[in-house]
C-alpha cells in the first residue's frame, strides 16, 4: 500500500517538474536598458577634449550638421544622434578603426 502512495507522490513531483519546465520556456525576458549619459553635459571641457580631441562647441557643430541624416527610428531603444556622432568621434580619436 505504501508503495502505491510513494509512487503517486513521485508521479506528482514529476508532473510538477514537467509543468514548471514548460512554464519556464514560455517566460519572456524583460529588456533592461542602460541609462545613457550625455557626455556633453556630464564631462568638463578639458575632460571632453581629452576623450574626444574636440571642444564641446566643435562637437555640437558636427552633431548639428549630421542630426538630420542620423535621426533613425523612434522606437524604444534607439541611440540618439548625438551619441552616434560622439561614439564615432571617440573611435577615431583612439585610432580603433
Image (spheres, grey):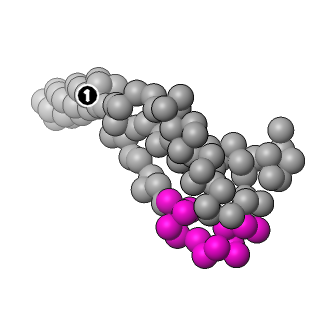
Front position in the image: 37 or 47: 47
Q: Is residue 39 magenta?
A: yes
**Figure check: 48 above or below 73:** below
Q: Position of residue 28 (x, y in %)?
A: 31, 31
Rendered location of residue 33, percent (x, y)? 41, 47
Q: Where, by quadrant of the figure, is residue 47 drawn?
A: bottom right
Q: Position of residue 80 (x, y in %)?
A: 47, 42
Main secondary structure along the magenta-highlighted residues: helix
Residue range in magenta is 38-50
Q: Would residue 89 be counted in the magenta stretch? A: no
Q: For label 1, count other residues whose C-alpha is less than 10 Å away and answer few (under 14), some (14-19) or many (20+).
A: few
Whether residue 3 is visible, yes or no, is: no
Residue 13 screen position, x and y as percent: 24, 33
Label 1 sits on residue: 23
The picture quadrant where one finds residue 44 is bottom right
Residue at the image position 66 percent from the left and 56 percent from the top: 58
- Callout 1: SS: helix
> Position of 13 compared to 73: left or right?
left
**What residue appears at the point 86 percent right and 47 percent down from the top-left corner?**
95
Amino acid at each position: 500500500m505504501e508503495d502505491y502512495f510513494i509512487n503517486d507522490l513521485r508521479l506528482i513531483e514529476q508532473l510538477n517538474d514537467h509543468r514548471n519546465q514548460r512554464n519556464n520556456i514560455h517566460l519572456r525576458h524583460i529588456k533592461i536598458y542602460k541609462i545613457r549619459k550625455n557626455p556633453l553635459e556630464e564631462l568638463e571641457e578639458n575632460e571632453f577634449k581629452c576623450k574626444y580631441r574636440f571642444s564641446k562647441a566643435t562637437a555640437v557643430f558636427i552633431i548639428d550638421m549630421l542630426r538630420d541624416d542620423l535621426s533613425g527610428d523612434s522606437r524604444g531603444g534607439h541611440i540618439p544622434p548625438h551619441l552616434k556622432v560622439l561614439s564615432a568621434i571617440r573611435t577615431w580619436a583612439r585610432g580603433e578603426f
